[in-house]
Image (spheres, coloured by chain):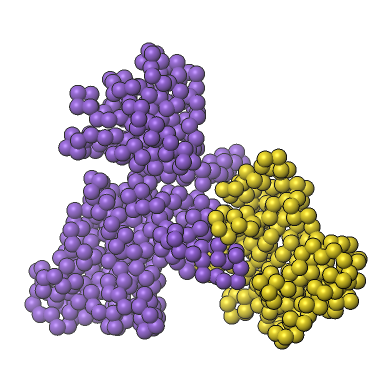
Amino acid sequence: MALDSLFDPDGVAVVGASATEGKIGYEAMQNAIAYDAPIYPVNPSGSGTVFGREFVSSVTEIDGPVDLALSCVPGPVVPDVIEDCGRAGIGAAVIFSGGFAEAGEEGEQLQRRLVEAADDGNVHLLGPNTSGFLRPAEDLHATFATGTEDIRSGNVAIIAQSGGIAFATAFRAENEGRGVSAMVGLGNSANVGFQEAIDFFDTDDQTDSIVLHVEGTNDARGLLETCQSASTPVVAYNVGEQDVGDFAESHTGSLTGDHELYEAGFAQYGVPTVRSVAELYDAGTALADCPRPSGPNVGVVTAQAGPGIAITDRLKADGATLPSLSDETQAVVEEILPGITFSANPVDTGRPMPEFGDVVEAVARDENVDIVLVYELFEEGLGFPTETLEGLPEATGKPIVFATGGARAALEPELEKMTECDIPTYTTPERGADAVGALVNYAKRNPLADAVESEVNTDD
Amino acid sequence: MTDHIETATSTGRTTLTESEAKEVLATHGIDVPDGETVRSPEAATDAARRLGYPVVVKIESPSVQHKSDWGDGAGVVLGVADDDAVADAAREIFETADRQGIDAAVRVESALEVDAGIEVIVGGTRDPSFGPTVLVGLGGVAVEVLQDTSHRLAPVTEEQALEMTHELEASELLDGYRGEPAVDREAIAAAIQTVSEFLVEESEVSEVEINPLLARSEDVLALDALIALAPDDESD
């Protein structure tokens, strides 16, 4: 892969490495040494060692394999550093400093020089103006930010235009007790942009879904085409709803804002969209953990009426369909629970009970249902029906999503067990509904894939 | 009928006149009202007689984009009912244009019963990042105040174009509200599709707007049209 040198490097040089605590070159060095590969501190004015590694005066002086440079030096000297990288055969660099295209005419000129140096030396650039990237499973923390070692490995890849949003989403994952397969802040995207990053993580074994934060790009059409051709599900968060178009010639121009086009474009190209960092990560975990949904029909099973009503309301607003359950399913449900409160859809068992898992299974096996959303408040004596639900997503080929509420200490181990069964969990009714909403929209926006596949099979 | 576009770009113009734009759209299958472009008050009267009263009299000039705002209302006169009124309206346009030193002609068109339909806007832009895009919206107050629009990247399928009309908040109005007849939703969708394909094919065109497109029970009619062109150095 083209970006192996960036995301899977054999050695790392920290350019501008420093022994002074608090400096970017120190933090980046501290993060880098966790990675299982040679790490070289580079600084012409450095002497002795830092974190047990001897300073090297230039990347061209490194004796050993090195694919990636982390550039901690100020903007104006970056083009020279990248020129040296090219000469040293270093295939990728992360550029933390700002003052490039985001900072007016002079900055744009500096970025042009930077890209020229990168093109000449064949160097892939992440940034400039980025906080870097993380691959927790490899202990690769290509960043100067602190506390990133607590971000666990997971199956969602975050690709954000803003480094700040990248970290906001990754720490959200950590707070949720989950993790990420990668976190990438693109910054100015000098020569590695959405397309290149999406292509890379589409074929990454650890990545089961890709979540995007998009402010604006000069090739939105290309971004959309890349999303469409990815086989990994993609979900997107576009910021800028309140911005208006800056065309003046006509109503059409002033009515056509970028946000409208991103929303319309993502819908046309098969990508569900969300409206917050929290929702972005939730949608990512639903798409990553669940089997691919085959349609928008949601069966809801709830142990409490109120949350069930809130969920149903929210699901409908998200574009879901709540089909009637088949007579067969209704009969099974009534056999399990004679005199059940409401057995159509949602199925309301009235309270948690030992048979709750069997009811969920009956609904999951209903041919009218494409996706199952379960809500059950945690009850100490009963626990969750994890044993019954284990293997159900795989057996039915349908997403099963679990929403709940309870005291954190009691919930956490239980939810972890549920997640291990490929059933993503959410701790409010609406979060569960919105995560299912992303699955629904993914199914609605990618309707042809199955039909095309079966057509191909018939031709064989 | 791309000749109009070629002629305009070769003379450095960035917009087509209304009658040029309508002619271009008509060749792509979008109906426009009958009309003639004239150069004198006398010719305006002759044209109005041929078209039949009432008529609409409007300024036609590459320098004037917002016709109804032009010349204190002289730019568009609706419901003109006889020879004298046509000649007066046309004379006012020519004299105002002379005072402003702009080159202008007069467009005389058959007046339509606009109450017998709903005005919508159908348009499209060539966005530097997204490429060709299309929109549909309810016309008049709805589009200006409520911004009730639906967008897609072009080209769109017939199904997508139809879906766009259903996405409008005011979509129900198209089905006939409080006893009004339903308008031809398929014809609106066809116009959206035509604009979408036109933008995809004609790379010099930066913007198209049919505003209003009068949607009636049996068809749609482009009452006004704008086609803007991108200078060469921007179209690549």
Q: Quadrant of residue B234?
A: bottom right
Above-or-below relation of A21 to B151: below
The C terminus of chain A lies in quadrant: top right
Q: Quadrant of residue A352?
A: top left
Asked if residue A214 lies left or right of residue B2, the reply is: left
Which residue is depicted at the point 28% across and 26% down?
A385
Asked if residue B41 lies left or right of residue A186, the reply is: right
Which residue is depicted at the point 34% across and 37% down?
A429
| x then y, percent, for residue A42 | 19, 76
Q: How many marks?
A: 0
Residue B61 visible here: yes
The N terminus of chain A lies in quadrant: bottom left
Which residue is depicted at the point 62% across and 79% down?
B232
Q: Could you say which is closer to the camera, residue A34 or residue A133? A: A133
Asked if residue A374 lies left or right of residue B119, the reply is: left
| x then y, percent, for residue B222 | 74, 60
| x then y, percent, for residue A236 | 42, 54
Above-or-below relation of A89 to B119: below
Which chain shows up in purple?
A
Check the rendered structure and report the hue given to chain B: yellow
Residue A457 visible here: no
Q: Could you say which is closer to the camera, residue B17 or residue B47? A: B47
Which residue is depicted at the point 45% across and 26% down?
A345
Above-or-below relation of B172 to B220: above
Q: Could you say which is closer to the camera, residue A45 or residue B223? A: B223
| x then y, percent, for residue A48 | 8, 77
